[in-house]
């Protein structure tokens, strides 16, 4: 049975996270419902990266198998059929979820296990702005940017992130390889950017919240190292809300999608 990846982006404000849950509206549930309406076939999606309630994504992926002949839908060539699928899906989906691409892949491709890295941004604004309320964290305090940058550098040399993982996780290891860790200014926002081969549950928000304590002078860089070395989640702070967090990208090995990337039917 043919397998496809769906690339999508979404604003997570109105959803109880990415993954399907009983009696809760989720990104997965909305996309599965749209596919069933369009193809008249019940599909179960597999997600690449779970995001929690209120968290957004510039890029995330699902994969699915279907008996529907998407490659020749409507008697047209595969590329046009794919664009037709994307167009129809976006017409059905609510405005805060957008399908960007449909990508044919081999039957053994897996959007979660084959990903080689993921990147997140956490947005903070320090002057009251009603237009940023749902997509960033209002934190109106004076910050020492040099101390924040030092903390981000410390994380590049860290391997064990036990202190920054929520409890009751199914993770078999707390080792993560940080590829990028930096603070930067983007217009009205202070942004923490982090990229790694894998992330733990709640990790990005815990890193952000704990480093904000350093930026405010409530935690020293040496004390930050002690939090890391303690391997105890009670030592870190998780006190930042979900709306500031964006999944920015999910990356796969070079050439993973071959030459069959299907462009969405968008201007």
Image (cartoon, helix red, strand yellow):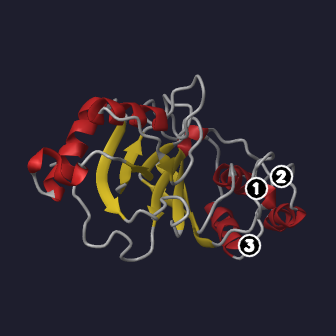
Q: Which residue is mark 1?
A: 164
Please name whichever residue, 181 or 34, is drawn nearer the observer in this view of the structure: 34
Q: Which residue is mark 2?
A: 233
Q: Position of residue 183 (x, y in %)?
A: 56, 62
Q: Is residue 131 left or right of residue 140?
A: left
Q: Position of residue 67 (x, y in %)?
A: 33, 47
The disc, 3 or 2, on the residue closer to the chain's N-terminal end is 3
- Quadrant of the snapshot with the N terminus: bottom left
Label placed on residue 199: none
Please name whichever residue, 172 or 133, is drawn nearer the observer in this view of the structure: 172
Tag 1 secondary structure:
helix
Q: Which residue is mark 3?
A: 158
Measured in 3D between alpha carbons, the distance from the residue under mark 1 to the one under mark 2, in whole angstroms, is: 6 Å
Q: Quadrant of residue 37?
A: top left
Write the residue at 60% across / 27% down. Answer: 22
Tag 2 secondary structure:
loop
Image marks 1 and 2: residues in contact by CB distance under 8 Å: yes
Residue 126 can be seen, yes or no: no
């Amino acid at each position: 049975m043919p397998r496809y990846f769906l690339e999508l982006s979404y604003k997570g404000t109105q959803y109880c996270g990415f993954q399907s849950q009983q009696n809760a509206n989720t990104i997965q549930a909305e996309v599965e419902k749209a596919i069933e309406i369009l193809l008249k076939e019940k599909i179960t999606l597999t997600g690449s990266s779970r995001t929690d309630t209120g968290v957004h994504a510039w890029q995330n992926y699902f994969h699915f198998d279907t008996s529907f002949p998407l490659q020749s839908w409507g008697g047209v060539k595969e590329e046009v059929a794919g664009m037709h699928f994307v167009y129809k899906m976006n017409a059905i989906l609510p405005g805060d979820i957008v399908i960007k691409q449909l990508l044919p892949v081999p039957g053994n491709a897996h959007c979660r296990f084959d990903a080689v890295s993921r990147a997140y941004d956490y947005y903070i604004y320090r002057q009251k702005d009603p237009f940023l309320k749902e997509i960033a964290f209002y934190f109106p305090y004076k910050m020492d940017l040099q101390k924040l940058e030092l903390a981000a550098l410390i994380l590049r040399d860290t391997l064990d992130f036990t202190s920054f993982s929520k409890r009751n996780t199914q993770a078999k290891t707390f080792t993560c390889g940080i590829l990028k860790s930096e603070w930067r200014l983007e217009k009205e926002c202070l942004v923490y950017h982090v990229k790694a081969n894998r992330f733990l549950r709640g990790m990005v928000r815990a890193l952000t919240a704990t480093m904000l304590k350093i930026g405010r002078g409530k935690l020293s860089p040496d004390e930050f190292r002690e939090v890391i070395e303690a391997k105890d989640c009670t030592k870190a702070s998780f006190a930042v809300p979900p709306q500031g967090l964006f999944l920015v990208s999910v990356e796969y090995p070079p050439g993973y999608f071959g030459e069959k990337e299907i462009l969405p039917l968008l201007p």
